[in-house]
Amino acid sequence: MRYALIAAAAVLGLTAATPSANAIGCLSGGAAGALAGHMAGHGVLGAIGGCIAGHQWHKHQMSQKAMQNQQDYVRSRQQQDPNYRNPWQD
């Protein structure tokens, strides 16, 4: 019983000390890839590919949202100050 408590405390301590993973998009992409890979007979490879594709898709969505926010910012600044130049353009 004592060893089980020590082991549980060690596992809890190690999980608290590790940094969190940035797996946004990976879980949903991995699940879809695992399902597609399972149908083709390669579930693990499908899950890995789906995870990579899902993560890249999420990054793409975030960059599009950031670009929209930049355009909104520039538009509002140009309405306030007609001489404002967009710092993100050449």
Image (cartoon, rainbow, N blue to C red):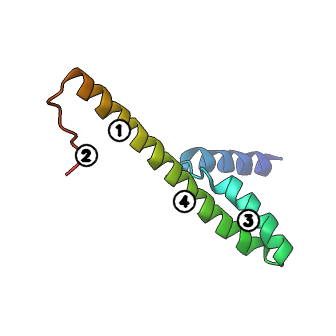
Q: Which residue is mark 4?
A: 56
Kindly report the distance in space between the C-alpha atoms of the residues bearing marks 2 and 4: 23 Å
Q: Which mark is residue 79?
A: none
Kindly report the distance in space between the C-alpha atoms of the residues bearing marks 4 and 3: 14 Å
Q: Does the CB distance between marks 1 and 2 fall below 8 Å?
A: yes
Within 10 Å of disc 3 (Cα), the crowding (few <14, some 14-19, many 20+) is many
Judged from this view, the residue extending furthest toward the top is 80
Kindly report the distance in space between the C-alpha atoms of the residues bearing marks 3 and 1: 33 Å
Q: Does the CB distance between marks 3 and 1 fall below 8 Å?
A: no
Q: Residue at x 77, y 66 (%)?
A: 34
Q: Which residue is mark 1?
A: 70
> How many numbered badges does the structure rendering display?
4
Q: Amino acid at mark 1?
A: Gln
**Secondary structure under the numbered disc 1 in the rendered image:** helix
Q: Which mark is residue 33?
A: 3
- Apparent side of residue 17 relative to residue 26 in the rendered image (left or right): left
Kindly report the distance in space between the C-alpha atoms of the residues bearing marks 1 and 4: 21 Å
Q: Quadrant of residue 79?
A: top left
Q: Amino acid at mark 4?
A: Gln
